[in-house]
Amino acid sequence: MKPIELIKQPILEEMELFESKFRESMVSNVPLLNRITQYIVRRKGKQMRPMFVFLVAKMVSNGKFEERTYRGASIIELIHTATLVHDDVVDDSNRRRGFFSVNALWKNKIAVLVGDFLLSKGLLLSIDNEDFDILKLISVAVREMSEGELLQIEKARRLDITEDVYFEIIRQKTATLIAACCGIGAASVGSSKEEIEKMRLFGELIGIAFQIKDDLFDYTEDKIGKPTGIDIKEQKMTLPLIYTLNNCNSEDKKWLINSVKKYNKDKKRVKEVIAFVQEKGGMEYTIQKMKEYHSKALDILETYPNSKYKESLLTMINYVIERKI
């Protein structure tokens, strides 16, 4: 059985019911909108975010589950989908998960409006049901995702990202949404403020480990489904490169910065940069950092009694750092 199928086992029924509830939450009176949202739903990804919501909710409440939990998962998925639709417009990307993106099929203007519609649907779903605690958790995540993207754009222009800034960017860009999923899972079943914050931190740690793993793919030569050197071509400063820049002599540093700034489209030069990062221990350092965050997440999980939900979350966080794509 694939890891994702294994993780889903204890919440299979909930995930199936969630599918129909999520579809309902997207319904509109405009036929064009319905056509586009149906297209989006049919091309859904692994749905790891609702899985986090459900597994955390069940783990912290000994299997208890409420309508609020389904709403929390739907709100997360609506807002996450809205950000993906907008991201494809911002990045001028024509593909999403191997299919045409919304902007490729219906152009940018419609894609932006669809993203706005999904965002408002998510906000209204929480407001109409007075789920203000859930609304706050997701609103903080959306704010931080925007700040993280803008911080990365600002720093990429000057290539002056320190390790601290890198961790702040990935915490905001990637980890904050997974943190919101786990916080919402706990909040949806009436957990205390302390427990909600504990679960939110758990999600943040996993999210950071997840993004570090993603950044490692750029410097590996495995057939992983993601071309190597993409981050270098896009002048993204990730941890393997930041570590190497901080641990080489001034001549090598100058060559590295010059390569990323001026020769980032030169395949031969990009390969040389990857080889240099590997040789200088950038990979080992990054793997060690990823394991540190993974270990902190495990420590939080260990404070809960054994259950099939805890087991699934264990499989999930191990999958995050062991995945090949």
Image: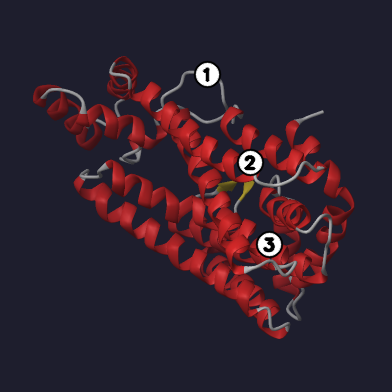
Do labels 3 and 2 touch, CB within 8 Å?
no
The x, y position of residue 277, in whole percent, is 31, 22
Reading the image, the residue beneath label 2 is 98
Reading the image, the residue beneath label 1 is 222
Q: Is residue 238 visible?
A: yes
Mark found first going from the N terminus, 1 or 2: 2
Residue kind at label 3, given as amino acid type: Ala
The x, y position of residue 138, in whole percent, is 57, 68
Q: Is residue 175 above or below residue 312?
A: below
Which of pointers 3 and 2 indicates the residue nearer the eye? 3
Which residue extends farthest right? 13
Mark found first going from the N terminus, 3 or 2: 2
Residue kind at label 2, given as amino acid type: Gly
Do labels 3 and 1 touch, CB within 8 Å?
no
Q: Is residue 292 left or right of residue 307?
A: left
Do labels 1 and 2 touch, CB within 8 Å?
no
Instruction: Measure how far apart labels 1 and 2 are at the Cα level.
Output: 20 Å
Is disc 2 placed on a helix, strand or loop?
Answer: loop
Q: Residue at x 19, y 33 (%)?
A: 257
Reading the image, the residue beneath label 3 is 186
In the picture, the quarter occupied by the C terminus is top right
Q: Tell me if mark 1 has few (under 14), some (14-19) or many (20+) residues whose alpha carbon lies within 10 angstroms of its own.
A: few
Is disc 3 placed on a helix, strand or loop?
Answer: helix
